[in-house]
Amino acid sequence: MPAKKQMNGSPEETEAAFYDALSRADLEAMMALWAEDEEIVCIHPGAPRLIGHAAIRASWEAIFERGGVQVQAHQIHATHNMLTAVHSVIEQIQRPNEQLADIHILATNVYMKTPQGWRITMHHSSVAAGKAPLDLFKASTLH
């Protein structure tokens, strides 16, 4: 585990750093975002549940062997309290071949406030076929 991790002042900053590390295939930056607790969990689309730093690190290392993944998180629904935050997002993957079937990734990112800043405790993502759903929550809000 790295001796020094960057400080993140909000769950949103941690989430932005997560997607940045993913796009750059930066394993050290990715792992620096995770909580030091060994009970951290990561579930990639169609893959088994991974628990702990070693298993999660190995999974990202395998993913990053093919290079970075360009992902944009949309339709973020967040629930926060003083020590935890849960973000439900729809991830859009930028693909060079638009002939592929429409897919979107449904992801849940859970963050915990630690003495070192906000850290990831869980990332769970799954593939869903078809176009991403409309954000009905925002569509129903009157201004």
Image (cartoon, grey):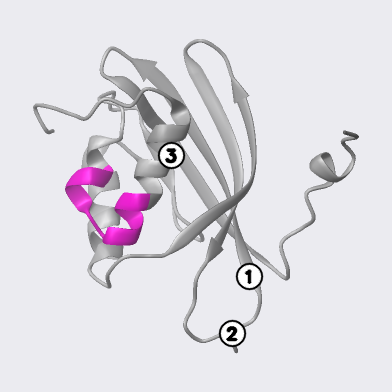
Amino acid beneath label 3: Glu
State yes or no: discs 3 and 2 in contact (Cβ < 8 Å): no
Q: Which mark is residue 100?
A: 2
State yes or no: discs 1 and 3 in contact (Cβ < 8 Å): no
Picture residue at 84% right of the left edge, 46% below the top: 136
Q: Which residue is mark 3?
A: 15
Quarter assignment of residue 61: bottom left
> Closer to the camera, 130 or 141?
141
* Secondary structure at numbered mark 2: loop
Task: Describe residue 5's horizontal placement relative to residue 22 as left or right.
Answer: left
Magenta range? 20-30
Q: CA distance from mark 2 to mark 1?
A: 8 Å
**Residue 87 image position (x, y, % from top left):** 57, 35
Q: If you read the primary sequence from the N terminus, does the residue marked by circle 1 or circle 3 appear first? A: 3
Task: Describe residue 69's horizontal placement relative to residue 106 as left or right.
Answer: left
**Residue 15 image position (x, y, % from top left):** 43, 39
